[in-house]
Image: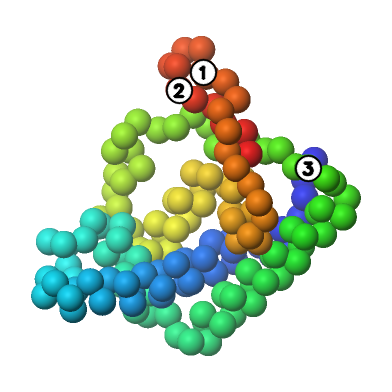
């Protein structure tokens, strides 16, 4: 079963990068002001610094457009529940990666690229998160070869 998002995947990723990263700017600025610590690679992980930089570049117009896109997606997801009482998806499309894999190469990524990596890693959860739909990931099984958990949302 394929349910349409009502927006393109790329637009969803970009909108979330704008919202997440722009929101992050205020938090990081407040911590830096309170502690006197610089906002650079000595105090932030590469992905966080990339997102901070991306957020500093966001305009009010792009932020408003991102919120509008998320609103359209939320309405589309709401429509799914006119047809279905319950939706079950995998939590992740593949087994969890080894620790450290996720951050590999982050020092050369932009905030948009980092957000795309996050969404690529867990493509089944964003629509529900954005729409504010009650959802949870629960253990379903363990991979026989690795023992890693397999979740269902």
Instruction: Nearest to the eye among marks 1 and 3: give it.
Output: 3
Badge 2 crowding class, 10 Å Cα cut-off, few under 14, some 14 to 19, many 20 or more, is few
Measured from the top left, where is residue 45 in percent x and y?
A: 23, 56
- 103 or 70, which is in the foreground? 70
Q: Specify which label sits upstream in the sequence, 1 or 3.
A: 3
Q: Is residue 88 left or right of residue 111?
A: right
Q: Quadrant of residue 113?
A: bottom left
Badge 3 crowding class, 10 Å Cα cut-off, few under 14, some 14 to 19, many 20 or more, is few
Q: What residue is rendered at 70% in x and 64% in y? A: 74
Q: Is residue 101 above or below residue 34?
A: above
Q: Quadrant of residue 44?
A: bottom left
Count the numbered circles shown: 3
Q: Is residue 134 left or right of residue 36?
A: right
Secondary structure, mark 2, is loop
Badge 1 crowding class, 10 Å Cα cut-off, few under 14, some 14 to 19, many 20 or more, is few
Q: What residue is rendered at 52% in x and 19% in y? A: 142
Q: Which residue is mark 3?
A: 86
In three-dimensional space, the C-alpha distance between marks 1 and 3, rounded to whole angstroms, equals 25 Å
Q: Which residue is mark 2?
A: 148
Q: Which residue is mark 1?
A: 143
Instruction: Nearest to the eye among marks 3 and 2: give it.
Output: 3
Q: Is residue 55 left or right of residue 72?
A: left
């Amino acid at each position: 079963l394929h349910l349409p998002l009502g927006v393109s995947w790329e637009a969803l990723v970009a909108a979330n990068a704008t919202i997440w990263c722009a929101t992050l700017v205020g938090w990081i600025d407040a911590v830096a002001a309170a502690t006197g610590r610089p906002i650079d690679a000595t105090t932030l992980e590469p992905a966080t610094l990339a997102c901070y930089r991306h957020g500093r570049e966001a305009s009010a117009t792009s932020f408003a457009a991102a919120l509008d896109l998320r609103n359209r997606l939320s309405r589309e997801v709401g429509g799914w529940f006119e047809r279905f009482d319950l939706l079950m998806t995998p939590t992740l499309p593949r087994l969890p990666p080894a620790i450290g894999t996720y951050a590999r190469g982050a020092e050369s990524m932009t905030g948009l690229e980092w957000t795309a990596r996050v969404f690529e890693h867990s493509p089944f959860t964003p629509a529900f998160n954005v729409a504010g739909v009650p959802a949870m990931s629960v253990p379903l099984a363990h991979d026989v070869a690795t023992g890693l958990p397999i979740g269902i949302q």
